[in-house]
Image (cartoon, helix red, strand yellow):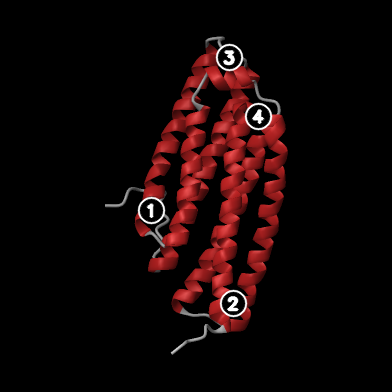
Amino acid sequence: MIIMATRFERQLEELHVQLITMGSLCEKAISLSARAIQGEGKTLSRLVFDTDKEIDAKEREIETQCMSLLLHQHPVARDLRQISSALKMVSDMERIGDQAADIADLALYIDQDAVCTSVDIVGIADETVKMVTESVDAFVKKDLDLCRKVIDEDDIVDNAFNKIKEQLAELIYGGKLDAKAGLDLLMTAKYFERIGDHAVNIAEWVEYSITGEHRNNEHQAYL
């Protein structure tokens, strides 16, 4: 016997697809911005800005879709969790797009020699890209273990940022790095660190959509 999906089920599936699309745009934006800061700023920054606009448009589309489902379908239990989680996730995804654009903007002016020789900006960029990719994958696969992996990885990015901050201070005070270049690098590292935080938020909302529990505890390690 063939069971036809209800209209509500089709709408939830469409919401799922839209979230995956927005997540893919976020992965694209942060990956491009990471490349831009490594020496391809003029070529790639415009692509990041355009992708950020796509992310903003997708956020509005998904929010409208979620509000329609809440107002007209009156979901309960797990369905309600999925929709409310989607609203939270798109907010974090939109911020990822904004911060990727901020990095791309800095890439237009930053001292490339400083990027290559002073601190490990490439390392923190790679870790952050991985967190964003994994948070989206956790949503697609409904994978709790991957959610928790993303949350744990936040410590790696935080430690990388703190190390960069200390190294930049030493270089500037020692006269080995121009203050402006140092501040640009610090801002870049901070944007990557904040993107990591948003990836963690997405993972936590994915976990909530699956389990009904939301652990907003400053990303403490799971026991």
Query: From mark 1 to mark 3, how far is it between C-alphas?
Result: 39 Å
Residue 219 visible to an observer of this rendering: no
Is 79 in front, or is 223?
A: 79
Q: Which residue is mark 4?
A: 40
Residue 177: give its label.
Answer: 3
Taking the image as shown, residue 141 lies to the left or right of residue 175, namely left
CB atoms at circles 1 and 3 under 8 Å apart?
A: no
Of the residues shown, which amino acid type is indicated by label 2?
Leu
Identify the amino acid type marked 4: Glu
- The residue shown at (46%, 45%) is 131
Q: Give the distance between the C-alpha atoms of the residues marked 4 and 1, in whole angstroms.
A: 32 Å
Q: Tally the numbered discs.
A: 4
Query: How far separated are the C-alphas under marks 2 and 1?
Result: 28 Å
Disc 3 from disc 2: Cα separation:
54 Å
Disc on the earlier residue, 4 or 2 = 4
Q: Which residue is mark 2?
A: 70
List the single residue furthest toward the front: 1
The residue type indicated by label 3 comes to Leu
Asked where in the image residue 89 lies, by quadrant, the reply is: bottom right
Q: Secondary structure at mark 3?
A: loop
Query: In the shown orientation, is residue 10 left or right of residue 46?
Result: left
| Residue 36 spot, x, y in % from top left | 63, 32
Q: Which one is in front in this view, the residue at disc 4 or the one at disc 1?
A: 4
Q: Name the outermost residue toward the bottom.
A: 1
